[in-house]
Image: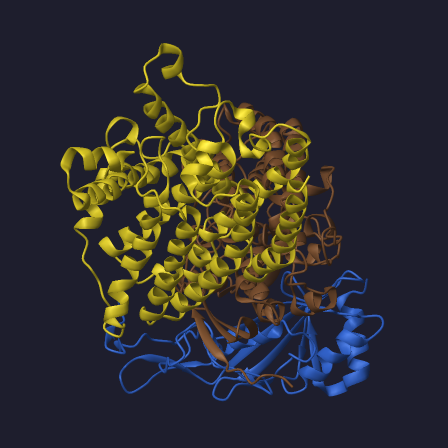
Chain colours: A yellow, B brown, C blue
Amino acid sequence: MMYDWLYNISGSEILAMFVVSLLPLFLFILPFALLAVLAERKVSAHMQDRLGPMRVGYHGILQTVADIIKLLQKEDLVATATDKTLFNFAPLLVFIGSYAVFAAIPFSGFFIGSKIDLGIIFIVGATGLVVAGILMAGWASNNKYSLLGAMRSAAQIISYEIPTLLIILTIIMLTGTLSLYDLSELQTAYFWNWLIFGGPAIGIQKILLIPFMMMGCLIIYTSTLAEVNRTPFDIPEAESELVSGYHTEYSGMKFAMFFLAEYANMFAVSAIVAIMFFGGYQSPFGYLGNTLNLPWLIPIEQFFWFTSKGLFFVFVQMWLRWTLPRFRVDQLMAFCWKYLIPISFVILLLVGLITLI
Amino acid sequence: MALKTEEMVLNMGPQHPSTHGVLRLELQLEGEIIIDVIPHIGYLHRCFEKHAEAMTYPQVIPYTDRMDYLASMYNEFGYALAMERLMKIEVPERVEYIRVIMGELQRIASHLVALGTYGADIGAFTPFLFCFRDRERILHLFEITCGARLLYNYIWIGGVSHDLHSDFIRLTREFIKDFRPNLKELNDLLSFNRIFIERTANVGVLPLETAINYGVTGPNLRASGMKWDLRKDDPYSVYHKFDYEIPVGSGEKGKTGDCWDRYFIRVREMEESLKIIEQAIDQIPEGDVTSAIPKRIKPPEGQIYTRVENPRGELGYFIISDGSLNPARVKVRAPSFVTMQVFPELCKGFMVADVVAILGSIDIVLGEIDR
Amino acid sequence: MKTAEEIFKILKEKFGDSIVELKSDKPIDPFVIVNPLEVDKICLFLREEKDLLFDSLMNLSGVDDANGEKVKDEKGLETIKGGTLSVYYHLESTSLKQKLTLKVSTNREKPEVVTVTESWKCADWHEREAYDMYGIVFINHPDLRRILMPYDWEFGYPLRKDYKNPEFYQGMKVPY
């Protein structure tokens, strides 16, 4: 893939590794995070019957540039009674936890950061770092509100990882592979081969799987929504109760790190849902490169399809945020433990039975 | 054997995104459960009653605006009504109709703010903007009549300051036509949303006996099950000429008197206000609106207590006059002041997140509480 | 629906001297003047009695009657000596649709009125406000402290007619 191509060109392993792992970061995710901030403001504005940022650039396109300049030049306030090491380290952990996952996500058939065999498990493990970062932030802020927010957030993320893992387990059981690259390659050629429609195998197994796959997709979408702390699960950042939760005391660039990490996380979970259920980078209709007999066009098309699917799910996440009110903390926990986890277990069991047919 | 947990005192301070104004709530928590709430008020005290003793009677009217700044027309209405009863002034019928129309439009505007901010507190940010979009049209109607959007100085003792603008009736009819589908949209988006019902049903239940003993009035009392509305039970102005209903809470989604009931009563009241405005526009007579305003207001010695139905409850004015040009005492019985007393009772046993829900549902305005 | 005269007769029969008189000459509302130290029993009776059933306290307000003599004290500022402070109660019966106004007067130097919070919890904050603004001490009140002014305001009671603002409060200049 990309790694091999770079290795062939440069001859050095380390250089190839560096370029390959940093490329998605700087070329794609950072610009995406910046654009996502703008997109959220415009999307929310149009949904609420108003216009959003209009002045900076044509219809407000350069608004994020203005925001970044503002955040960069802000004074970095650190209260005296905080635990300084933890306070400074927490945004880094959250940032690392959110961005590390992009090494294992295949952006197209040609490009994947690291062709690791344990793709999906690596991703779940890396997102666990975020919990540690949030708890550190809440504790080190020396603020009752931040502590409350951080504890709620940690409880929420840990609880909602369980339905996510159960559905991932279901997919692994069904397809027999952990690597996201293989998972995408499996769902090749036309949209009825996507896992949400039962997978590439033809037969009664496929028809039986469809309702369970759809339910599984819904469950994983909801649980990952809870993991990235988006409404209706945004208790940790509930503005009207806890001022701003665990990132109340942060200002300037550290706050920007939390912010960017949230948007990168959103894209990461949308990408995972897209890869697992909706075919990853595969096109639903077949490739233009194939019909025109231009093989170098295919990775570009795949990248285009992958980005659109990811962006569509990000859009749905934003849509949900501006439509639904917020859950209360005990209702959130009840929803996870009393409803999502039993249903996920049942799906796991039944899909396992179906694969034996 | 119960675990010994420590009590924590959490301060929802004077500056907070969802206490509606400058209110300080001292929450005594045990974990997440509330043991006691102590409200501290007085941050917005602007000495209305002391000012009123230094002003002449017509000069008090801009001060009455600023008490409950979301329902200014009704504050002026109450004061003007009290003075007219004390001085036995007969106002022309056109003035009465104009006052009713303005009052009911103001009721809709105030309820829109209450509902919008309540949704925003619960986490639904979009209905807030939809409500404010509709409120903009009402404020435009007020602007073409008297020039101001929030604090009007419009209803004077003996009449109103300006007659209706020539476009007013047409624009009001358009507003009513556009607002009814928007109400339905608000219901679909917020009122019957499953998550919203989970957050507000069975939370902060106010039993009827407690409500009457504490003097709670207005939509909060009606939500607890009592059909008590000053417009029908102690009628003033020309409200007896209109045909409208009084919505009463019935425990549709939980117990009677919970937050959802208080919220939904306000939605239904907006519909009833639309009916009143429609009938008033159709029936309004011609006349001169400033003919009955006396040149000098010097009421006889005596005292009077009058009340009107504010969007928040029963607004009472107790005016003592000693025969001179300045009042001897103007006491305002603000409905939010009385409702704030019952707030600690409502919160006991619920969680911190519910404090925000309950505070939003009783719809207080700090300007009224502190005067 | 009873008129003020009928209620006055019922009260006079029950309580005798505590009910002072019924004033109905000035406009608009007639009111019954009662003894300030007996007002809690009267209000309990008004709430419980079958024909009266006054279950709602609409309003409770302190009033400075300003009927003492104006004297100039040492600093040349005008104060009022003697005279009375009053408290007005506006009661209502929601079931029988009748209203009543009560008035109590206490002397200005040491104003004391019994609290009516046993009859209506609504009176709690109203009495705190009357204490804050006029200095009327309500005997047996559960929590009598200032409500609108800062808790440590020691410069008098603002709504009295002879109140003067202090120069400085906690280091801040008061006349703005």
Q: Is residue A35 left or right of residue C33?
A: left
Q: Nearer the viewer, residue A18 or B25?
A: A18
**Vertical placement of A8 versus A77: above or below?**
above
Residue B250 percent coordinates (x, y): 76, 52
Q: Is residue A51 left or right of residue A331?
A: left
Q: Nearer the viewer, residue A311 or A150?
A: A311
**Vertical placement of A294 versus B185: above or below?**
above
Residue B356 percent coordinates (x, y): 52, 60
Query: Does residue B216 appear in the picture of this structure?
Result: yes
Residue A283 percent coordinates (x, y): 44, 24
Instruction: Identify which residue is drawn at 28% across, 52% down.
Output: A257
Q: Quadrant of the C terminus of chain A?
A: top right
Q: Quadrant of the N terminus of chain A?
A: top left
Instruction: Determine which quarter of the picture holds residue A39.
Output: top left
Q: Nearer the viewer, residue A339 or C61?
A: A339
Residue A42 percent coordinates (x, y): 37, 34
Instruction: Determine which quarter of the picture holds residue A75.
Output: bottom left
Number of marks present in the image shown: 0
- Taking the view exactly as shown, the residue that stands out farthest to the top is A292
Instruction: Identify which residue is drawn at 70% across, 66% down.
Output: B212
Query: Does residue B139 appear in the picture of this structure?
Result: no
Instruction: Identify which residue is drawn at 53% across, 30% down.
Output: A194
